[in-house]
Amino acid sequence: MEKIIISVVGQDRPGIVATISEALFNLDCNIENFSQTILQSVFGAILIAAAPSDVSEDTLEHSLKEAVSHLSLDVSVKRFPMAPSTGIKQDNTVPFVITTIGPDRKGLVAAITRIIADYGVNITNLQAIFKGGEDPLKNMMIYEVSVPKAVDLTDLYRNLEAKAAELDLEINIQHRQLFEAMNRI
């Protein structure tokens, strides 16, 4: 089995995940990782699957496109190369959640992520929810991050807080377990 990466984008509607997963099952593929979201009314998914080595990339892409043709989705299939290690080991990091709330404007994500990157922090998940307008409660970003244990958290937070103040944002950083415990439904 070889790893493939598949991306799917298009207008959201019921049945997309079922159609994709059935098509992969019919090609004897096994879905290993699947992440999907809906942004406004647009469905987006990226997944990694193990495919039989005798099934070509072109065959997979053609079969998936045919399966979702009635849904008007864009599908892309690529071999998933086994990348060399990035040097970031999970046991050398601590999971945190950074949240910002405030008025929407261009450059918010760029400004906050630049500071995060400068500290060698890896963003593992990002949700930016902008509903527009000046109501600060309607605009939120949630960054799930892996912070290397060697990072000075006080210094990181101080720099994030300074940038947030420039952008008129409220910012909070919490250990992921604390965040999840406080936000559990």
Image (spheres, rainbow, N blue to C red):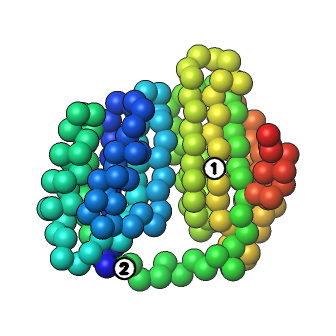
Taking 62 as reference, is 106 above or below it?
above
| In-front residue for pair 127/79 | 79
Q: Is residue 4 visible?
A: no
Decide if residue 57 is on the left or right side of residue 24.
Answer: left
Residue 89, percent from left and from top: 61, 79
Decide if residue 74 is on the left or right side of residue 92.
Answer: left
Q: Residue at x 73, y 76 (%)?
A: 150
In 3D space, how far apart are the residues under numbered discs 2 and 1 (Cα atoms)? 26 Å
The count of marks equals 2
Circle 1 residue: 143
| In-front residue for pair 13/107 | 13
Tag in front: 2 or 1: 2
Comes first in the chain, label 2 or label 1: 2
Occupied quadrant, residue 177: bottom right
Describe the element under mark 1 as helix, strand or loop. strand
Describe the element under mark 2 as helix, strand or loop. loop
Amino acid type at circle 1 is: Tyr
Q: Is residue 32 visible?
A: yes
In the picture, the quarter occupied by the C terminus is: top right
Taking 46 as reference, is 58 above or below it?
below
Q: Which mark is residue 82?
A: 2
Residue 16, percent from left and from top: 37, 40
Residue 112, percent from left and from top: 60, 47
